[in-house]
Amino acid sequence: MKSRRPVLIVNRGEIAIRIARTCRALGFPTVAVYSEADRFAEHVKACDRAIFLGAAAPQESYLNVERVLAAAKASGAAYVHPGYGFLSERAHFVEACEKSGLIFVGPSAESMRLMGDKILARKTVDSLNVPRVPGSPGAVTTAAVARKIAAEIGYPVLLKAAAGGGGKGMRRVDRDADIDAAFDGATRESLSAFGDGSLYVEKLILKPHHVEVQVFGDGKGKAIHLGERECSIQRRHQKVWEETPSPLMNRFPETREKMFAAAIKIAENVNYAGAGTLEFIADENGNFYFLEMNTRLQVEHPVSEWVTGVDLVAWQLFLAAGEFKLPAVPERRGSAIEVRLYAEDPKTFLPAPGPLGYIELPTGAFVRTDSAFSGPGEVSMHYDPMISKISVWAESRPAALDRLRSALDEVRVEPPRKLSGLPHGSLRTNLTFLRRLVRNSSVLEGDTPTDLIQMNPALTAPAIEDPSCEAAIATALVQLLYESGAMTDLMTGTADTGKSQKSAWALAGRREGNRL
């Protein structure tokens, strides 16, 4: 195997493990970084070595550029892979890497500034005559400015973080009176997640579908697409279900091709290098509007890998190493679906992290799990509460749905248990919700606008939980004792006492006429 230089993975959880896995297959040594909260995290063990960054707060660890660069220098890393989130879309970090002699695995700082910054991206897209959602031309500095723009384009609107994605720093506003609180909340959340509190205002398209195009560019003005993904099923503006091909685009194949053309036009215009995603909003009539570009590897990239057979992380690494030649558009085959298993309240979808006592993930043909855990651990309160991504592939969408349903039924995630067998800790998951989702009639029919969850209250109704394995065994033993009569003896005081007391089994045997 070719000797290669180390890759510093500036991330944590499942994505750090996923990147390390491909690095290992290609012969790239790996270096993990970790915070105080992640000392015992599995991504630390997944790499060849690990370097401590700092306290649990992202600003003291995963967002701290100075400490990340120091870790790269100490480890002798040549490449820096940011994964998604944290520093993955920060142009100043790309420039800092370049000044330190490091190769950033991703687009150039210029491309990232043009498209990763949601405000500049809108200006770039306007210059290319690609349709986009109406909104502010740039960042809004105060709630008063946001209120003025909202009045011009009409409610409802979205306040959105200029520096990131994933639903963080985003608020829906339906009336003028709610602007101030929403603006303050979105600013704080964006500052915490991305180190930048800038916001912009965007018109909220009602009954939309979220469709995105995976692209890969060579950094020299050429790019290809790897098909679309529909990510319309969301809660709190964050995706929980992603699939390809898009059920909506199956109804509008001409729109799909126009969307591909727009995505390539944008990527080539900015000399984009590596994996990126162009996100669009599409309505029920097949119209589409540019939303934003994520200048990084996307959480849901496995579904594109399923249908194309491409390892996107491998492509990223080969491009960074100067060993990549852009191929033709890969053939897409079959249907793939991914869901995200979160530590969260299944009704409110608020994070519910805590100790993890037991986890069992599905296996089998055409089933993939990208997980932060393979055994007991801790879902940290300091970071995104995703536990695992579960994805499947099949020849058709109905077959993929069947495979996903079976896979989710195999999943078992539990908090630790006390000696009494009762669960202990704050951990809750959205597993019941996901199992309901894969059986929902609208989902089965491919009718999945972004308000699907709100329109289907049964998806978040309180669950009648199945008893745990331990509780089922205890119940069976009690029933057995009752049926044998031993429990009655014990409860009425007629059982033998003292040193000669016989066991419940002996009492039952005597009653049945056995000699013991």
Image (tube, helix red, strand yellow):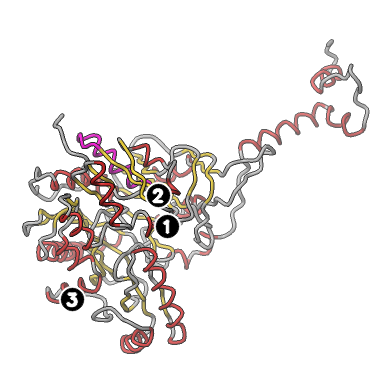
Q: Position of residue 82 (x, y in %)?
A: 27, 52
**Type of amino acid at the residue the image marks with label 1:** Ala
Which of the 4 quarters of the picture holds residue 141? Answer: bottom left
**Type of amino acid at the residue the image marks with label 3:** Lys
Q: Residue at x 84, y 10 (%)?
A: 515
For the image, the number of numbered tags is: 3
Q: Mark 3 = which residue?
A: 123
Q: Is 392 included in the stretch rendered in magenta?
A: no
Identify which residue, 212 or 70, lies in the foreground: 70
Q: Residue at x 24, y 39 (%)?
A: 23
- The secondary structure that most of the magenta stretch takes on is helix
Q: Earlier in the sequence, mark 1 or mark 3?
A: 1
Mark 1 lies on a secondary structure that is loop
Q: Residues within 10 Å of mark 3 (few under 14, many from 20)?
A: some
Instruction: Say whether marks 1 and 3 touch (CB < 8 Å).
Output: no
Q: Is residue 289 above or below residue 352?
A: below
Q: Position of residue 473 (x, y in %)?
A: 67, 33
Identify which residue, 86 or 436, lies in the foreground: 86
State the quadrant of the C terminus: top right
**Type of amino acid at the residue the image marks with label 2:** Ser
Q: Mark 2 = which residue?
A: 35
Q: Mark 1 = which residue?
A: 57
Q: CA distance from mark 2 to mark 1?
A: 8 Å
For residue 52, side relative to residue 279 (left or right): right
Q: CA distance from mark 2 to mark 3?
A: 37 Å
For residue 477, side relative to residue 429 (left or right): right
Which of the 4 quarters of the picture holds residue 175? Answer: bottom left
Instruction: Say whether marks 2 and 1 touch (CB < 8 Å).
Output: yes
Q: Position of residue 390 (x, y in %)?
A: 39, 45
In the rendered structure, which segment of residues is drawn in magenta? 13-29
